[in-house]
Amino acid sequence: MPLVNSKQMLLDARRDGYAVAAFNVENMEMAQAVLEAARTTGSPVMLQTTPSTLRYADAEVFFAMIQAIASSSPVEAALHLDHGNGLELVRRALHAGYNSVMIDGSALPFQENIDLTRDAVSIAGDIPVEGELGRVGGKEDDLQAEADPQTDPEQAALFAAETGVSSLAVGIGTAHGFYASTPALNLDCLSAIRAVVAIPLVLHGASGLTDEAIRACITRGICKVNFATELRVAYTAGVKQALRDSPGIYDPKVLGEAGKQMVRDLTAAKIKVCSG
């Protein structure tokens, strides 16, 4: 089916107590893998591209490719701009046809983050916008930050009301990339945010979290869970394994299929965790 607006997808997840799995994809094979996994599990899914991915290929290229792949899938899928780093990139994604965008002003002072996010919401019109409050640490793509482990619930309520965002990414101790040690997630903070914020909440930095930790966050109100680093690692591992097994391979399609299989298996497992 055609790509869909993600707003109702996340509202349904909030109502029914599960989360939509959202996966960062870098190429055609990864997009195919995610949508094949979604079809086998029968679950809605979001595919995401970051600023660096959109320097690798234009937003129009990713939209056309993913729209074409999704058209033969029976499950709902949305294409989302992840960690949009400015209004110009938001405009580019919207112009290309993306049906969900994020503006990340989390590194800005509180009022400046509100102002930037409100502007993105105004530009997006009927397209849902994800904002972020409270920095998720670690490094992913162009983003590198020290973690601020707690989004203040009162600020979160004000931010949601002032900006009009459709969903909100919150900081509760997660980090981008892999974890050097087990993260201390502030689940009480998450529950407090959920009690005062009516829109769906988003968990960034899920790569490397245990299934139990992800489920605990969903129980406390998370409606969308982002996965990025694990997919990159899985794809690369598949290609490396194919080269080890058959050093003479020179056909990119064979290598791409090997990477795709690893990503398909991983994403199917993550979708099942998020869907309960």
Image (cartoon, rainbow, N blue to C red):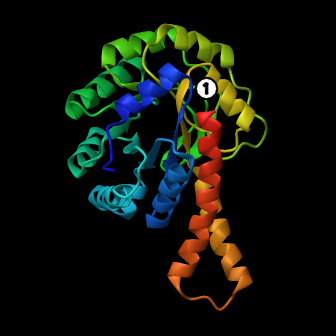
Tell me where residue 202 appears, x and y as whole percent: 51, 29
Foreground of the two, 273 or 132: 273
Residue positioned 59% across, 35% down in the render: 275
* Residue situated in front as seen by the camera: 182 or 62: 62
Q: Which residue is drawn at the image coordinates 29% and 42% (left, top)?
A: 90
Asked if residue 88 lies left or right of residue 265, the reply is: left
The residue that disc 1 covers is: 218
| Along the viewing direction, whichever of 226 and 57 lies nearer the viewer | 226
Q: Is residue 161 above or below residue 121?
A: above
Q: Which of the 4 image quadrants contains residue 238?
A: bottom right
Q: How many marks?
A: 1
238 displayed left or right of 133: right
**In percent of the image, x 34 and y 39: which residue is there?**
100
Label 1: which secondary element: helix
**Image position, residue 70 (x, y; %):** 37, 55
The residue positioned farthest toward the bottom in the image shown: 248
**Image height check: is 55 above or below 191?**
below
Q: Quadrant of the rendered structure where residue 167 is?
A: top left
Categorize mark 1 by other alpha carbons within 10 Å: few (<14), some (14-19), many (20+): many
Q: Is residue 168 visible?
A: no
Residue 14 in the image: x percent, y percent? Answer: 49, 22
Q: What kind of residue is marked 1?
A: Ile
| Screen quadrant of the C terminus | top right
Question: Residue at 51% of width from left, 81% of height from top?
Answer: 252
- One can see residue 72 in this view: yes
Residue 73: x and y in percent read: 41, 54
- The quarter holding residue 242 reads bottom right
